[in-house]
Image (cartoon, rainbow, N blue to C red):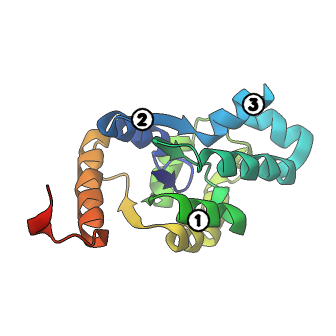
Amino acid sequence: MFLVGPMGAGKTTIGKLLAKQLGRTFVDSDWYIESQTGADIAWIFAKEGEAGFRERETRAIDELTQAPQIVLATGGGAVLAAENREFLRQRGIVVYLNAPVDVQMARTSKDKSRPLLQQPNPRKILQDLYSIRDPLYRQVAHIIMPTGHTYPRHMVSQLMQQLNAFFDCTDTTPKDNKE
């Protein structure tokens, strides 16, 4: 199970709760990159630029999408690379946590660890990123969940209902014959 969406959508919060509910391991791709490099994302951006970080991210997404029984929270820009979109779409169920820009602003306004928002006008950055990335999130998603309207535990409950419906729709075994 892979979670995609913009920064501030709740991928880490929802991912942890979902992993617990499903009895899986939670992995955040940014944390994974940091653990592999020994450096934080801001430092990687500062030293290698966004292109260097994206190369590291693609390697991480390739590895992590092959790991069994995980719930993976991807970085907001993971969908920018066609290769990442292919890994995600082909190797698991992708849930797009769709957060409006106002929700993103409220959740990220004081967070100094987000290199792309260290600009004079973070709202414009978020709006620009959303307009570019939203179609990519939609392209890769099997399920789209709006965020910012309810508590995380309630959202996980709603997501579990959608997952159950998704699997019922994709299962070729008639419901009457299930054990």
Vertical order, 121 against 176 (above or below):
above
Q: Secondary structure at mark 3?
A: helix
**Circle 1 or circle 3, nearest the eye:** 3
| Residue ID for mark 1 | 130
The image shows residue 33, relative to residue 73, as above or below, that is: above
Q: Are marks 3 and 2 in contact (CB under 8 Å)?
A: no
Mark 3 — residue?
36
**How far across and how far down the image is residue 73, in percent?**
53, 45
What SS does tag 1 mark? helix
Q: Name the side, left or right, on which 155 lies relative to 94.
A: left
Determine which residue is flagged by label 2.
16
Does residue 178 appear left or right of residue 168 in this picture?
left
Q: Which mark is residue 104?
A: none
Q: Position of residue 178 (x, y in %)?
A: 15, 60
* Residue 170 on image: x %, y %: 31, 70
Q: Residue at x 64, y 33 (%)?
A: 31
Residue type at mark 3 is Gln
